[in-house]
Amino acid sequence: MEKHSITDRQFVSRLIYTVLCDNLPVREAILNFPKNTKDKSLKVAYHALIHREADDNLRAQDIEYREEQDDYLEFLAETLQKGESVPKNIIKEYEAWYPETTLPYSDSIKDLLKKLCKFLNV
């Protein structure tokens, strides 16, 4: 595995821990995600954070659900902190639901063109 990928994994791990400690809103964590990543483990973490944000009302009503979701995010953070890949069965599960993962792109000209092509479905 590339050193860059391990660094990104550890960075995302810190983002997740910061969210779990309520020191960073999920939206901020998502905005700070590594740009243009191909790392499937980071894509899983990205979607897990998206789900946490989307489930805000459910989390407020169901303590067990909130604890389960937070435990899962903590598991992801621990795995990424070690620089390890998320288990393949979890990656496969996410790929089934999100074959075309949309992650943040950088703001370079090349990436702006990618966004435009994706928008135009080219």
Image: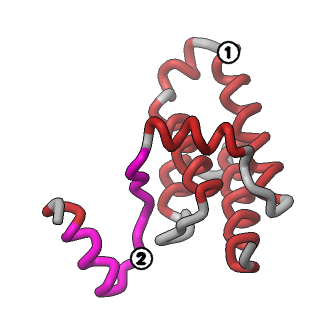
What residue occupies the far right of the structure in this picture?
Answer: 82
What residue appears at the point 74 percent right and 44 percent down from the top-left corner? 87
In front here: 106 or 121? 121
Of marks 1 and 2, the one in the foreground: 2
The amino acid beneath tag 2 is Ser
Up the image or down, 87 lies above or below 29; here it is: above
Q: Position of residue 56 (x, y in %)?
A: 50, 28
Local SS, label 2: loop
What residue occupies the far left of the structure in this picture?
Answer: 120
Magenta segment boundaries in residue numbering? 99-117
Q: Which mark is residue 63?
A: 1
What residue appears at the point 20 percent right and 69 percent down from the top-left corner? 117
Question: Does any portion of residue 45 appear in the rendered image?
Answer: yes
Q: Position of residue 44 (x, y in %)?
A: 59, 47
What residue appears at the point 67 percent right and 69 percent down from the top-left corner? 8
Q: Which mark is residue 117?
A: none
In the rendered view, does 96 fall on the left or right side of 22?
Answer: left
Q: Quadrant of residue 102?
A: bottom left
The colour style of the image is secondary structure
In the rendered view, does 62 fall on the left or right side of 82?
Answer: left
What residue occupies the far bottom of the structure in this picture?
Answer: 109
In front here: 18 or 81? 81
The verdict on residue 112 being magenta is yes
Q: Quadrant of residue 85?
A: bottom right
Q: Residues within 10 Å of mark 2 (few under 14, many from 20)?
A: few
The amino acid beneath tag 1 is Ile
Q: Position of residue 29 (x, y in %)?
A: 56, 56
Question: Does any portion of residue 21 appear in the rendered image?
Answer: no
The residue under label 2 is 106
Q: Quadrant of residue 69?
A: top right
Q: Quadrant of the N terminus?
A: bottom right
Q: Position of residue 62 (x, y in %)?
A: 61, 12
